[in-house]
């Protein structure tokens, strides 16, 4: 098979195409003939040497989500068969023409979607469901803030929460991105380069029940200040700074919950439970068009370095996809 290999930690240029032996599915896995693979921020961190793959996943082939056709199934797999079209969350190895995936981490490609669109779904949809709906316990009628509203996570979170009956606020770095967030039906989009989101929401008398944060640093204290009593702050990255100074008294008085998670190292059973919820609650909304994949640009596998350069520029809106 063809695979993208991280030759050594470094910039986008360290990603190189190599021929590798095809992987063999374990008893509970499937082998997927990959047609498209999503590019995500954790892939960049792995390329730079800061996000090692969990045990059992390739440590030199990045890629956390794919779409394609099942080529082979393990002996214990009952729910899939060769020829099924699926998208899947994987712990690594997705930048390749073939990859194995736990059967329970696969989902059928929603009706009406092509492989590129389907490959844009797993990583962000699993992440948002796990952190907003499971860990953050979002409930219909609550207000929700996601930072980075036009990132892959952001466009997913806006649409998912809105479709589940939430009031949605977001932040973004340009007016164009704010306008796009509103197009996705965010109720408010704040240009963080021009306005302080805490002051803006307070001036609008808007408080928030659940926040999904990827920034960290001084955003943490601001998030705490705007949360309603019983509010929940869920942290999934700290791109600005992993350390924050916060007022513990505010957490106690407002009875806040501050939590966070990473998904990559969790068990197939844990991810399988998320997949079942996505299939039940979210996949029907994709098939009706209520939730839409947002694809910014596609690249052929051999141009993966350009895809990473675009990811690092943060100029994109939505997902970046490799076509294989």
Image: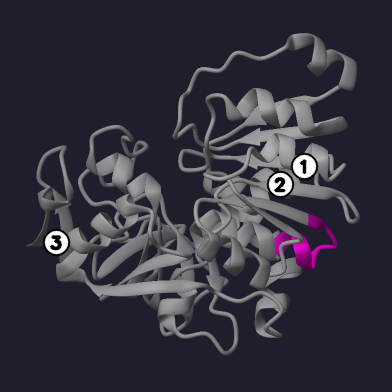
Q: Distance between the residues labelled 3 and 2?
A: 44 Å
Question: Observer-nearest residue: 275 or 64?
Answer: 64
Would you say residue 161 sits in the magenta stretch?
A: yes
Q: Element at badge 3?
A: loop
Would you say residue 25 sits in the magenta stretch?
A: no
Q: How far apart are marks 2 and 1 (CA)?
A: 10 Å
Q: Element at badge 1?
A: helix
Q: Can residue 1 be seen in this view?
A: no
Task: Look at the image and give the residue range highlighted in magenta.
Answer: 160-167
Residue highlighted by disc 1? 201
Residue 229 in the image, given as x and y percentages of width and height? 90, 29
For the residues bearing labels 2 and 1, Cβ distance under 8 angstroms = yes
Residue highlighted by disc 2? 145
Picture residue at 72% right of the left edge, 69% below the top: 185
| Image mark for residue 21 | 3
- Mark before the other along the chain sequence, 1 or 3: 3
Q: Distance between the residues labelled 1 and 3?
A: 54 Å
């Amino acid at each position: 098979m063809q695979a993208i290999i991280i030759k050594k930690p470094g910039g986008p240029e360290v990603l190189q195409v190599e021929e590798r032996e095809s992987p063999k599915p374990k008893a509970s896995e499937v082998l997927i003939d990959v047609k498209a693979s999503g590019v995500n921020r954790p892939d960049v961190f792995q390329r730079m040497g800061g996000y090692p793959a969990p045990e059992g996943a390739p440590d030199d082939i990045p890629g956390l989500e794919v779409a394609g056709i099942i080529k082979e199934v393990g002996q214990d797999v009952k729910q899939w068969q060769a020829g099924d079209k699926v998208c899947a969350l994987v712990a690594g190895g997705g930048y390749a023409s073939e990859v194995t995936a736990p059967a329970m981490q696969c989902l059928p490609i929603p009706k009406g979607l092509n492989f590129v669109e389907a490959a844009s779904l797993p990583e962000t949809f699993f992440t948002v469901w796990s952190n907003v709906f499971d860990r953050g316990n979002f409930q219909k009628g609550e207000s929700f803030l996601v930072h980075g509203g036009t990132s892959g996570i952001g466009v997913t979170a806006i649409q998912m929460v809105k479709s589940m009956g939430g009031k949605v606020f977001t932040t973004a770095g340009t007016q164009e991105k704010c306008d796009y967030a509103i197009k996705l039906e965010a109720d408010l989009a704040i240009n963080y380069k021009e306005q302080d989101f805490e002051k803006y929401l307070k001036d609008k008398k808007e408080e928030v029940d659940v926040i999904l944060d990827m920034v960290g640093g001084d955003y943490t204290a601001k998030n705490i200040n705007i949360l309603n009593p019983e509010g929940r702050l869920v942290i999934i990255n700290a791109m600005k700074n992993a350390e924050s100074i916060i007022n513990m008294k505010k957490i106690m008085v407002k009875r806040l919950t501050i939590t966070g998670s990473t998904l990559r190292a969790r068990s197939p059973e844990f991810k399988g439970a998320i997949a079942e919820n996505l299939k039940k609650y979210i996949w029907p909304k994709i098939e009706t068009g209520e939730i839409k994949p947002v694809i910014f640009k596609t690249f052929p596998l051999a141009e993966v370095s350009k895809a990473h350069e675009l990811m690092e520029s943060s100029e994109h809106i939505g997902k970046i996809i490799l076509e294989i």
